[in-house]
Image: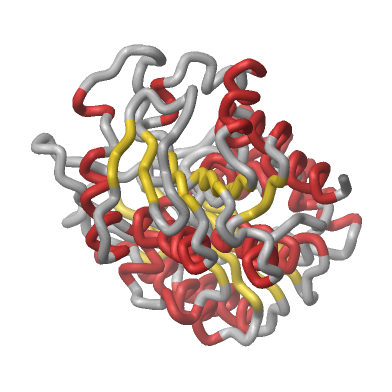
Amino acid sequence: MNIIRFEDLVAQGQATGKRVFIRADLNVPLDDAGNITEDTRVRASVPAIELALKANAAVMVTSHLGRPTEGEFKPEDSLAPVAKRLGELLGREVKLVSNWVDGVDVAPGQVVLLENCRLNKGEKKNNEELAKKLAALCDIFVHDAFGTAHRAEATTYGIAQFAKVASAGPLLAAEIDAISKALEAPKRPLIAIVAGSKVSTKLTILESLSKNVDGLIVGGGIANTFMLAAGLKIGKSLAEPDLVGAAKAVIESMKARGAEVPIPEDVVVAKTFAADAPATVKAATDVADDDMILDIGPKTAAKLAAQLKAAGTVVWNGPVGVFEFAAFENGTKAIAQAIAESSAFSIAGGGDTLAAIAKYGIEKDVGYISTGGGAFLEVLEGKTLPAFEILTKRAAG
């Protein structure tokens, strides 16, 4: 994917003393007192800002926070806690600027945080007049918010359309590189793990991947629907019987290419959905009418682990069982450990996947951990994200 990289602009001296507008993703969780409870996104935004400051640029940074009503400021929508945390991380004061659309006073070597961009009227609908005003604030626009790359808004798309130069920040560029490596020119075999409670929410992803991957591992409630499609009984497990036809079509699409969707050979069941429910390992053919499948069994886990260790590329989205309960975590743990031990390039994304990676301490063993939930899923669906599209267009001149 051909894009202008902000790092290259800095290296070539093109950002020196310039006005630089960075769209970061600083949408962090806050407690009732307005304190940041988890600051990963703020920390991830620092490299782009430091790059700009190194070039003695006049730096403006903005982000959305929560879901404010456009044009109506409420204290809980303010980026004030973020300005404070950003200041601590950068080791300098970061001034918060309100009502900034018509002009920002910032000198070379300074950085300011522009108040929640979703307070601006026309932001979400990518209003052209607003986008042109934003573009006029800077010499260089830097998109560094992969979590918003699937949205065409004024600070993510419109500004990129009209700014003198539109570039990708280090965080966004890393996502683009990882996605290209995993999906556009993957080292084979390419194995995808798609798990979750419902086939319906991931059907387009499954259909898209079935045309490209060498193995498609399904887990969670999705696997139960595929077990039904394979003619197995699943008791009272979570599934979507009306999507059995769609699951069969994915299996057939894979089979036609000599690829497969491995159906579990054994499963871990319980009579109730509870952390203390007694867990029983059963063959996939022996599930009783009152059983709930809450994990894959040890035979299946070992078979999938062997497949992952032999892979060239792994794409992981979703745990394969109820890994929050100790009795039903072994499948997800085995998958996580296999990915960690595999020499494959791995890319993982999605909230539950990140929680599993953290739980099993394999952060350093995953090739790339994607920061954008919705954007990551849309890439897996085969969609071209608006941010990628406009940055590619601008790079082509």
Q: Nearer the viewer, residue 54 or 264?
A: 54
285 displayed left or right of 83: right
Q: Is residue 121 above or below residue 243?
A: above
382 displayed left or right of 71: right
| Outermost residue toward the right in this view | 256
Q: Residue at x 68, y 58 (%)?
A: 176
Q: Position of residue 282 (x, y in %)?
A: 43, 64
Q: Residue at x 74, y 45 (%)?
A: 391
86 displayed left or right of 221: left
Q: Is residue 274 above or below residue 184?
A: above
Q: Is residue 16 above or below residue 116?
A: below
Q: Position of residue 79 (x, y in %)?
A: 29, 37
Instruction: Report the number of numbered marks.
Output: 0
The quadrant the C terminus occupies is: top right
Q: Residue at x 38, y 13 (%)?
A: 71
Rendering quarter of residue 294: bottom left
Rendering quarter of residue 229: top right
Q: Position of residue 231 (x, y in %)?
A: 65, 46
| Outermost residue toward the left in this view | 33
Q: Position of residue 237 (x, y in %)?
A: 43, 42
Q: Nearer the viewer, residue 189 or 9?
A: 9
Q: Nearer the viewer, residue 233 or 109?
A: 109
Rendering quarter of residue 344: bottom right
